[in-house]
Amino acid sequence: MSEPEISGTHPGQPRPVRLRDALLRARIEAADRTGVVVDLRDAEVARLEILNDGLDPLFAQVPDQIDLFDRGISQGDTPRLWIDVVAHIVMGRDKRMYRFVQDTRFGRIVLAESHDTAVIVEAVTDYVARRMVERERAMVVPPEPQAPAAVPPRRSRVWPFVFGFVLGAAALFGVAVLAALRSW
């Protein structure tokens, strides 16, 4: 879809902005003017929605059969834009800075931090590419061949039987001798 040209525009002027983007920016400006906590939270959500829209071209390129990514905005105490199960974007303390973080076994690490959405989009693009390469490696690399377990040499079962038979016969002979000696 191409955006309609406005009559009287020059090629050097920027194209008109979508109404949705203009509404989001207006909400952010309104939140900037007021100090109400709810409005700040709404501003966080609006900024995350703008970033989410900026990520649309990236996720449109991810093949449908790759289900590593589950992007969406969670509406909790701290709004977050989730990229996948372990990575998300939150707003910084000043509510204007994007912070792209990943949860690991060793804690949370910051992958990127910036006021500019383009920088965060680039960081998310790199992250998505790395995750896709990890997936390819996991799917392609065959498991290492396991050496067959060494089979212990099979022992003959005859010798323990013979030994048990001889020991049993000797015990019976010993009991018989003792019985004969007592009865004498």
Image (cartoon, grey):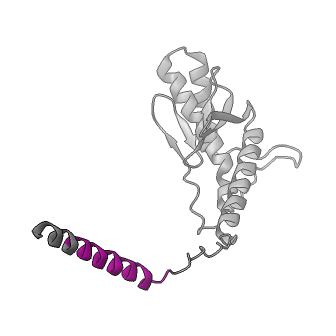
Give how far across and how far down residue 35 sits, in percent. 54, 14
User: Which quarter of the rendered picture does the C terminus lie within?
Assistant: bottom left
Q: Is residue 4 visible?
A: no
| Residue lying at the far right of the rendered structure | 12
Q: Give residue 7's position: percent from left, percent from top.
A: 78, 50
Depth check, front residue: 162 or 99: 162
Q: Quadrant of the N terminus?
A: bottom right
Please report the residue visible at 16 percent of the width from the left and 73 percent of the height from the top: 180
Number of marks present in the image shown? 0
Residue range (magenta): 155-175
Question: Based on the displayed image, in which of its 4 quarters is residue 89 positioned?
Answer: top right
The image shows residue 176, relative to residue 134, as above or below, that is: below
Q: Is 75 a magenta residue?
A: no
Percent from the top left, x then y, of residue 74?
Answer: 49, 40
Residue in the foreground of this view, choosing between 153 and 30: 153
Q: Work out which residue is located at the far top of the displayed protein and give it.
A: 35
Q: Position of residue 174 (x, y in %)?
A: 25, 71
Q: Is 123 in front, or is 5?
A: 123
Query: Is residue 41 visible to the viewer in this orientation of the structure?
Result: yes
